[in-house]
Amino acid sequence: MQCNGCEFRPELYYDPEFQIWARIEDDGTLAIGMTDISQTIAGRILHVRVRRPGTPRPAGKPVATIESGKWAGPVPNPFDCTIDAANPEVLDNPALLNQHPYEAWIARIRPVAALEQALAGLVTGEPARDGYCTRVRNEDIHCKRQAV
């Protein structure tokens, strides 16, 4: 599904600003990545740095840092967690975040609290779609994938 050309995936969990997505993995971790909105706003992503696996991170603190041609900033985590792994493919080729934002996860994190409790602050499904589409319309965001 798309809004203003921005891809949306209803099965994922999103932070309230629709900057990051989270997907539950089979091992109980959550893969996190940038939304189509975020990769569009950032522009061509040049560098990704993920905190060391095993590092505890409080809610709102960065799990990773992204650098693009026009922006450098954090990838905040939505809840207290421990970093489980970085995506080596994204570290080697950061442009994957521009080309495939929903396949190219940045890090896997393990929530400190129970999974249901950790996900309580995120949105998914139809409510997420409504918020996502409202943001792209209100801010007149038109997503495009960066060619590399």
Image: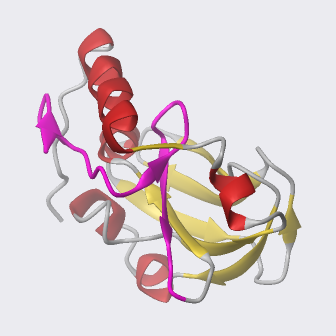
Image quarter of the N terminus: top left
Q: Is residue 78 left or right of residue 70?
A: right
Coloring applied to the structure: secondary structure
Q: Which residue is found at the position 43% from the left and 38% from the top?
A: 70
Q: Is residue 56 above or below residue 130?
A: below
Residue 124 occupies quadrant? top left
* Number of numbered discs: 0
Q: Position of residue 34 (x, y in %)?
A: 43, 53
Q: Position of residue 142 (x, y in %)?
A: 18, 28
* Numbered range of the magenta stretch: 1-26
Q: Position of residue 35 (x, y in %)?
A: 38, 48
Q: Is residue 112 left or right of residue 39?
A: right
Image quarter of the C terminus: bottom left
Q: Which residue is found at the position 54% from the left and 66% from the top?
A: 48
Asked if the stretch drawn in magenta spans residue 74, the answer is no
In this rendered view, identify the residue nearer to me: 44 or 30: 30
Q: Which residue is found at the position 51% from the left and 30% from the top?
A: 17
Asked if the stretch drawn in magenta spans residue 23, the answer is yes
Q: Position of residue 40 (x, y in %)?
A: 30, 40
Q: Residue furthest top?
A: 138
Q: Which residue is found at the position 31% from the left and 10% from the top?
A: 138
In this rendered view, identify the residue nearer to me: 55 or 11: 11
Q: Is residue 133 above or below residue 87?
A: above
